[in-house]
């Protein structure tokens, strides 16, 4: 009897241990269909923006701001309600067309490259620097899993050739497969991580064409492509190169444009201040609204920024409003920060504000 009791006790202990391990696994390792957004970092732009011949030294700093994005388990879900400045969002709101996290990151990287090119153009246009646009090719943002191409191509691959035809634009890619039928194969030359590879890949009917007539259906590789281009100054002395590492997304455009302008102009427009901010920018210098601005205000304040440029609230012609400046101002007031929140609609707005600043001693 005594031995049986010991066996039962040992069995209960083993069972309890397995239950505890299972619970720990669920709590810590099973992801929820959510992401948590929180303040990221404020990164000084000077080391990222390189030019052969800078106009002069700077006493202040321009900084881009980021939002940190993390997966959520049960522990982080509960903690998000007690930790300040955290926001939960459904993954499906962020990921498009059932893309993976890797494909999302690749999309953000491509958007960042476009944002950098637009920022360079905006600064060059303002300074009167002659330049031209160079097409750098077509890159894969996403591969649909049900297509044969998914066995070969990955997000981030550059499509170099199709059946011997060089591919540099989306239209060239589309034309290269335009006369093909479902099941036909094409010879793809693509580049991944500096290595060029070749593969025959079968084509299939593209999504969302089931209701079309059979002879009207288009076939393709089943990828989401994006054109990549760069901006080349006519003078090598004015050529800007941006190395932003793994930072992605479009929202650093305004701050890149300000840093580039500062590098190429004789005057130090920072005037000794630490200046952060956010906002998309187009080649004409128009500043567009972005997401996560409340978190970016926190990141800028933690980095000691004294001025924060925020895109003006966007008022849609149909009556809706996308808040940016008002959200940034509300968060700054909530934090009781001395950091000045400045609304801007254009690059000119930011430059005029800086021109009116009294230089720091």
Image (spheres, rainbow, N blue to C red):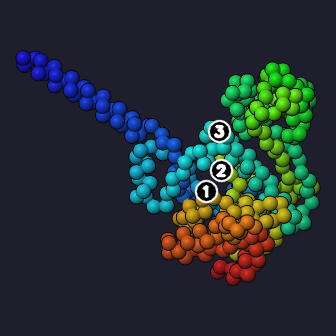
Look at the numbered discs 2 and 1 and tell me whether their residues touch, using CB distance below 8 Å. Answer: yes
Q: Which residue is mark 3?
A: 99
The numbered mark at residue 66 is 1
Q: Which residue is mark 2?
A: 247
Callout 2 secondary element: loop
Quadrant for the C terminus in the image: bottom right
Q: Is residue 62 left or right of residue 8?
A: right
* Front disc: 2 or 3: 3
Q: Nearer the viewer, residue 187 or 318?
A: 318
Instruction: Report the Cα–Cα distance between label 2 and label 3.
Output: 19 Å
Q: Is residue 115 above or below residue 221?
A: below
Count residues near mark 3 (Cα–Cα under 10 Å), then give few for <14, some for 14-19, many for 20+. Answer: some
Q: Quadrant of residue 277?
A: bottom right
Q: Nearer the viewer, residue 135 or 333?
A: 333
Q: Residue at x 92, y 60 (%)?
A: 130
Q: Nearer the viewer, residue 305 or 122?
A: 122
Question: Which label's residue is closer to the chain start, 3 or 1?
Answer: 1
* Front disc: 3 or 1: 3
Instruction: Report the Cα–Cα distance between label 2 and label 1.
Output: 8 Å
Instruction: Report the Cα–Cα distance between label 3 and label 1.
Output: 22 Å
Where is residue 129 shown, x and y percent of the image?
Answer: 90, 62
Question: Which label's residue is closer to the chain start, 2 or 1?
Answer: 1
Q: Quadrant of residue 223?
A: top right
Count residues near mark 1 (Cα–Cα under 10 Å), then give few for <14, some for 14-19, many for 20+. Answer: many
Query: Is residue 293 at all visible to an observer of this figure?
Result: yes
Callout 3 secondary element: loop
Q: Is residue 306 left or right of residue 284?
A: left
């Amino acid at each position: 009897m005594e031995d049986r009791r010991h066996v039962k006790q040992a069995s209960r202990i083993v069972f309890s241990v397995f239950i505890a391990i299972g619970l720990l696994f669920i709590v810590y390792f099973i992801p929820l269909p959510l992401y948590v957004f929180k303040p990221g970092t404020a990164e000084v732009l000077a080391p990222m923006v390189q030019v052969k011949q800078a106009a002069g030294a700077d006493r202040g700093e321009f900084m881009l701001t980021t939002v940190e994005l993390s997966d959520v388990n049960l522990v982080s879900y509960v903690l998000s309600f007690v930790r300040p400045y955290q926001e939960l969002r459904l993954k499906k709101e962020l990921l498009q067309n059932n893309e993976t996290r890797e494909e999302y990151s690749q999309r953000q990287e491509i958007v960042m490259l476009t944002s950098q090119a637009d920022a360079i153009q905006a600064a060059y246009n303002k300074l009167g620097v002659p330049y031209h646009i160079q097409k750098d090719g077509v890159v894969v943002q996403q591969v649909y899993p049900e297509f044969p191409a998914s066995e070969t191509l990955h997000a981030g691959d550059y499509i170099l050739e199709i059946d011997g035809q060089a591919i540099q634009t989306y239209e060239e890619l589309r034309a290269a497969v335009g006369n093909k039928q479902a099941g036909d194969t094409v010879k793809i030359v693509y580049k991944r991580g500096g290595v060029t590879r070749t593969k025959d890949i079968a084509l299939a009917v593209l999504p969302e064409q089931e209701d079309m007539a059979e002879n009207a259906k288009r076939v393709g590789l089943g990828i989401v492509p994006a054109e990549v281009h760069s901006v080349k100054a006519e003078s090598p002395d004015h050529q800007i190169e941006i190395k932003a590492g793994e930072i992605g997304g479009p929202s650093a455009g305004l701050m890149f444009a300000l840093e580039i302008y500062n590098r190429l102009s004789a005057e130090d427009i920072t005037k000794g201040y630490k200046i952060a901010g956010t906002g998309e920018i187009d080649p004409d210098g128009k500043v567009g609204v972005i997401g996560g601005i409340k978190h970016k205000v926190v990141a800028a304040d933690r980095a000691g920024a004294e001025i924060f440029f925020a895109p003006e609230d966007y008022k849609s012609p149909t009556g809706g409003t996308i808040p940016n400046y008002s959200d940034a101002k509300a968060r700054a007031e909530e934090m009781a920060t001395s950091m000045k929140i400045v609304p801007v609609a254009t690059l000119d707005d930011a430059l005029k504000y800086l021109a009116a600043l009294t230089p720091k001693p």
